[in-house]
Image (cartoon, helix red, strand yellow):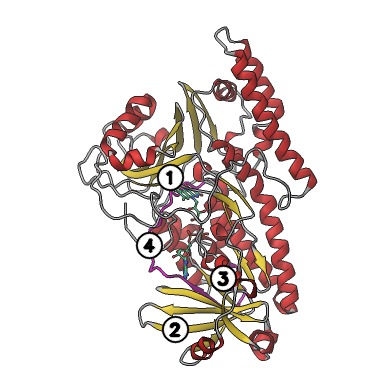
Amino acid sequence: MPFERCAANPGWCRSSLRYGRSPSRGRVEPARRSSLMSNVTSEHADAVVVGSRIAGAAAAIAMARTGRHVIALDRVRFPSDTLSTHLMFPAHVAELVRLGALERVLAHRPPRVRHVMLSHQGVSASDRFLPVEGIDFGVCVPRPELDHALVETARAFGAEVREHSSVTDLLWDGDRVAGVRYRDKDSDEVREIRAPVTIGADGRRSVVAQLVGADRPYRGSRNGRGFVFWYMDDPKSDDRKWRETYVQWRAGGTHGMVFPTPSNRMLVSFMGPADRVALFRRDTQGMWERQLRENRRFAARVAGATNITRMRGTDDMVSFFRRSSGPGWALAGDAGHFKDPVLGQGIRDSLRHGRLVGEAVVRAGDDGPLAIDEALRAWEKERDDDCLPAYHWGNRETRIVGDDPLVIEALRTLAVDDLSEIGNAFSRRRNPEHVFGFRRSAGWLLRALSRPDADRGALLRRALGELLIDVDIRYERLLGHFRDSRPARSERPGWSWPIRKSQVALNGQGGAGSTGPAFVGGTMTDGVGNGTQDGSR
Ligand SMILES: Cc1cc2nc3c(=O)[nH]c(=O)nc-3n(C[C@H](O)[C@H](O)[C@H](O)COP(=O)(O)OP(=O)(O)OC[C@H]3O[C@@H](n4cnc5c(N)ncnc54)[C@H](O)[C@@H]3O)c2cc1C
């Protein structure tokens, strides 16, 4: 029986139990400790998961479906929205299949998106997705439905998902995390769950990360872009081509994007210089009109759209890696690693590495705490290896580069290349270092230089900058010293920690029949998506 040692003889997970932060972060005072230990309901599980959305549900599914007793806690009640778009490529969908959640997600009847198109200065390249484990389409299902489908799948596999349950402390056995203490927000009762492994899947502001002393990332990069988005009725709802295509139009330094969603709606977003988010907040209608003027092709796609929801966004998204495993604990999903959403990869990575951490625990489960810790370390290394290329790619994409002759040349070439592999890069079938790497970049540079109106000096400087980044990334990978090496040139300095809480979200509102997202002022939401429940579609 799994975890027999803990269940039958819980000595190692109960002895010298105490509360609060890890020894390195200070201990709870003895007097407080004894008062805390009385009057709390206590129970055992094989694993406890903090946070039940993407990574948390995936981890819970992986463990529960092998018969483990898993308790997953979340402080919100599902369905619940969070500050995130939800672009999913075939690699994301393949993870839903592995988790047994696809049917529930497809019940929301999202369009099956089979193409991705990138466009800059009137030059466009599109690519059809190739299958990832047999899946050749992406879907864009809003977070309340997507996350709820995952929660329901976890329950169907036997995980106990407790909503309105907010984790406040960890239980410790010496230097080992031995479970959690949480408050049931409905009854206001404080409870404990003891378990040989605790998985923090509680998002970027992870409480578990703080309590184990891993809050400050060891690598990070400042995002130069801000993100604003909202939903509209799709005026091209009858046009199969548009309903099956994710599109990104670049104009100046801003990406305008449209992703088809269920019920003939679409998600519309802009990623431009971070300081524009404040402008959107001050003058939403004016900024919307400005985007339409600056990005004509985007304007043509959305022309006539109505029924616009309020606008939301954030201007401060630090990409990072945190130490993500230790004795009896792991940090899955955004809690351990976050990368710029410009590429739409976070959900795939949270699903995949949430599942993998659960599977690692299952494999090690019968062999005691040291085996669990070793499995968690190996899992973390695998996550880093898998996520690092997309992290660097995201960091590069977040730099604000105005109209870019190199990108234009790249798109011209990729538009006629049967093996453009744009879709493969987004689907993680191919490492972006290969898709956008040395050989191809050299060709794009030569073509750009050969144009009569080329600014050759600027082009060469730009290409040299890119080359140095490529060299840095490859060198770091070959050395295998990700953690202790100096920051790579793809990483933007100046990131601060913790993430600023103000200026991260805005709250506009359109409404049925409206043709522009009028800003109405109002409350600021939690810009990191923890605990927001705002039904904003
Ligand atoms: C603006 C933006 C746009 C994005 N767009 C995309 C996209 O298009 N495609 C894509 O793939 N990725 C996207 N991402 C990334 C994606 O949102 C994340 O990678 C993903 O949500 C991570 O899932 P998670 O389960 O790790 O964390 P979260 O989704 O943050 O969930 C954490 C959960 O933990 C719970 N929790 C927190 N603290 C506690 C506590 N103390 N006790 C109990 N529960 C707790 C919260 O209530 C929450 O439900 C975007 C991110 C942002 C910021």
Query: Which residue, given by chain and number where applicable, does mark 4 sit on?
Result: 80
Query: Which residue, given by chain and number where applicable, does mark 2 sit on?
Result: 190
Q: Mark 3: which secondary structure?
A: helix
The tag earlier along the polypeptide, 3 or 1, is: 3
Circle 3 crowding by C-alpha within 10 Å: few under 14, some 14–19, many from 20 = many
Is the C-beta separation of discs 2 and 3 under 8 Å? no
Residue displayed at 31% across by 34% down: 287
Vertical placement of residue 509 versus 173, above or below = above
Q: Which mark is residue 211?
A: 3
Pick out the residue farthest to the bottom. 38
* CB at disc 1 and ligand 1 closer than 8 Å: no
Magenta span covers which residues?
62-89
Q: Taking 187 as reference, is 89 left or right?
A: right
Q: Nearer the viewer, mark 1 or mark 4?
A: 1
Please name the predominant secondary structure of the magenta segment in the image: loop
Is the C-beta separation of discs 3 and 1 under 8 Å? no
* CB at disc 4 and ligand 1 closer than 8 Å: yes
Of 407 and 172, nearer the camera is 172
Query: Which residue, given by chain and number where applicable, does mark 1 sit on?
Result: 315
Pick out the residue farthest to the right. 479
85 inside magenta stretch: yes
Circle 4 crowding by C-alpha within 10 Å: few under 14, some 14–19, many from 20 = some
Q: Mark 1: which secondary structure?
A: loop
Residue displayed at 67% across by 50% down: 386
Vertical placement of residue 344 versus 167, above or below = above
Q: Quadrant of the N terminus?
A: bottom right
The amino acid pointed to by label 2 is: Val
